[in-house]
Amino acid sequence: MSGERIQFIVAMTLYMSVVIGIGLYYAKRASATSDNFLIGGRAIGPWVTAMAAEASDMSGWLLMGLPGVAYWFGLSDAIWTAIGLLIGTYLNWLFVAKRLRGYSVVAGDAITIPDFFSNRFHEKNKVIMIIASLFILVFFTVYASSCFVAVGKLFATLFGANYQLMMIIGALFVVSYTFVGGFLAESASDFMQGIVMFFSLVAVMVAGISYAGGISAVFSNLRAFPGFLEFFGIAQPVTVNGEQVVQAGRPLFGPAGKYGLLTVISTLSWGLGYFGMPQVLLKFMAIRKTSELSFSRRIATTWCAISLAAAVLIGMIGRAINPTALLTQSASEKVFILLSTNFFPPLLAGVVMAGILAATISSSDSYLLIAASAFSKSIYQGIMRKEASDRAVLYATRITLLVIAVLGMFIALDENSVIFTVVSFAWAGFGATFGPIMLFSLFWKRVTRSGAIAGMLVGGGMVFFWKLVLKPLGGVFGIYELLPAFLLSCLAIVLVSLLSPEPSAMIQEEFEQAKVFEC
């Protein structure tokens, strides 16, 4: 083994040791009660809340998927996605965070998203809880697989080893410390990993601009590629069997494609997904005081703006400096790894690339934990065994976590998976299933249980239908499935709620209490 790879291993091992140490530190507290394991006892501070929410949200997609899109297609697709996400981040913290923190306490002290929805509508037969839990299990399994793909690509590239083996090793590492430490370990480590992600992105961006001779030199090189620097056009790599053609040492692009207003709106709709992201919403529910949410919002928005901008620039810098290094869309997602190994000494590069590991871990632990809690707390204790002890719920959570991890690893076995594509589908699923009903639950007193059920089924079902049936038709159907699914879910909620009897006086009274609740 080369000295370079040994230094990579040393840096990664040191990083993993710190993360495992965090898990072990919180193991006793996490195992004390299911409340501690699943939501940290609602005692998370503003810095940890903000950084953990953003780190768990962005995942390896931020350091691999988004730069890969910028490297492959140019500015437009990446920047409009980033703008949509930034707007969604700010609005979610501004409108949803405080109301959800209070309402989750008023509505039976709910500690999971399915619990909140079920308690909000005073369910007796737990239909909403079952629907919400099943959608969480499906989409978070897909989400976890995207994280395993990211860590597999990272380790396989760095160590020249088999992708499948490296993916499984990385997945087992994530599972091990989440299994031990629960929400407290996840939140504390996510705080650290958010910092690592931020500085890794900024370091690679600054080094890349310096290496290229300044930002003007980067843009000058990219102007040779049609559509690459356009906001309303998109680069079209010429490919044969999925690999970009190279002529005279330069990558071949066709004429710039159109990126019209409908496509811009469709891409901006990524921001709608935030209103339904359980890993972010759960952090809102876990903060210790509602008064600290304003400070958390400022931290989260600033982190998000700088990190997204850096990720887009890294992809473009990579294309300007190494235009023929990554010739497939899947390979383009390794641009962060490529630049890190080119710019920094091996040991420092290993530390920088720990940002990818940080992003992957910070998300997959959230996904696994929330999906496991959806089953153990909502289905196992809520429906199957209502008399289950707190200890039994903890055991069920951990067993479910292992099962979901195995399914995620199975999905991630394909080395050619495109992280951006996998994430975009799961993001749409959560955004359309939970986003509309979350907003209506928090801000419309007239919404009914029937409306909630209709909205979730229409939103989640339409994501599958649009993606698999309508989107392949092209044209207007080619838009991102989140937008039509979200709008149709809203329509279903309103229509069915107006056609069904008003909520009970007790439900409406709780709604009014939640509007002014402080904790």
Image (spheres, helix red, strand yellow):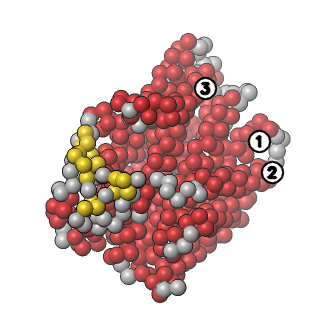
Q: CA distance from mark 1 to mark 3?
A: 21 Å
The residue that label 2 is drawn on is 392
Q: Which residue is mark 3?
A: 453
Which numbered disc flags the more N-terminal residue, 1 or 3?
Answer: 1
Q: From the viewer's perspective, is residue 215 above or below residue 502?
A: below
How crowded pointer 2 is (Cα within 10 Å; few <14, some 14-19, many 20+) is rated as: some
Q: In the displayed structure, would residue 290 be above or below residue 457? A: below
The answer for how far apart the CA atoms under marks 3 and 2 are is 29 Å
Amino acid found under the numbered disc labelled 2: Ala
Q: At 50% across and 26% down in the image, what residue appears?
A: 489
Q: Which residue is mark 1?
A: 381
- The x, y position of residue 137, in whole percent, is 64, 44
State which tag comes first along the sequence, 2 or 1. 1
State yes or no: discs 2 and 1 in contact (Cβ < 8 Å): yes
Sequence-wise, the earlier of marks 3 and 2 is 2
Q: Residues within 10 Å of mark 1 (few under 14, many from 20)?
A: some
Is disc 3 in contact with disc 2, using a CB cutoff of under 8 Å? no
Question: 315 left or right of 58?
Answer: left
As helix, strand or loop, the secondary structure at mark 2 comes to: helix
- Residue 137 seen in render: yes
Tag 3: residue type? Ile
Q: Is residue 305 visible?
A: no
Quarter of the rendering occupied by the C terminus: top right
Label 1 vs label 3, nearer the camera: 3
Q: Which three-letter amino acid code belongs to the residue tagged 1?
A: Gln
For label 3, the crowd category at 10 Å Cα-Cα, with few meaning under 14, some 14 to 19 and many 20 or more, is many
The image shows residue 448 at horizontal and vertical percentages of: 58, 21
Q: Position of residue 479 (x, y in %)?
A: 38, 34
